[in-house]
Amino acid sequence: MQTIQASKFQAECLSLMDAVATSGETWVITKDGKPIAELRPYSGGRIDSPFGLHPKLEIRGDVISPLEGNERTNY
């Protein structure tokens, strides 16, 4: 993984984006020596589900409050 200072990235942004698209390499952008962002090739869209790989998962009822007694339901 390559690193580049934010000021240099600003000056070379478009050419670096072209290089990342062709090479597939990830670059870490730093500011004051600390990593602040990554530039990587686009890998596709995000999953719309907030449950990651479980898009058909449904939440039924209150999932925050603890269950009292034997109120557990098997699904």
Image: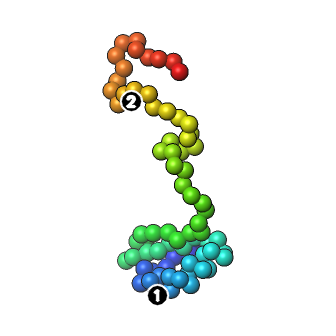
Q: Position of residue 73 (x, y in %)?
A: 47, 17
Kindly identify which residue carries mark 2.
Answer: 63
Q: Quadrant of the N terminus?
A: bottom right
Tell me the quarter of the picture where residue 31 sits.
bottom left
Q: Nearer the viewer, residue 12 or 3?
A: 12
Q: CA distance from mark 2 to mark 1?
A: 49 Å
Residue 5 sits above or below residue 72 on the image: below
The secondary element bearing badge 1 is classed as helix
Residue at horizontal 53%, vertical 21%?
Answer: 75
Kind of residue indicated by mark 2? Val
| Residue 72: mark | none
Secondary element under disc 2, as helix, strand or loop, is loop
Q: Upstream in the sequence, badge 2 or badge 1?
A: 1
Find residue 11 and name its label.
Answer: 1
Q: Residue at point 51% right, 49% down?
A: 48
Looking at the image, which residue sits at the far bottom? 11
Total marks shown come to 2
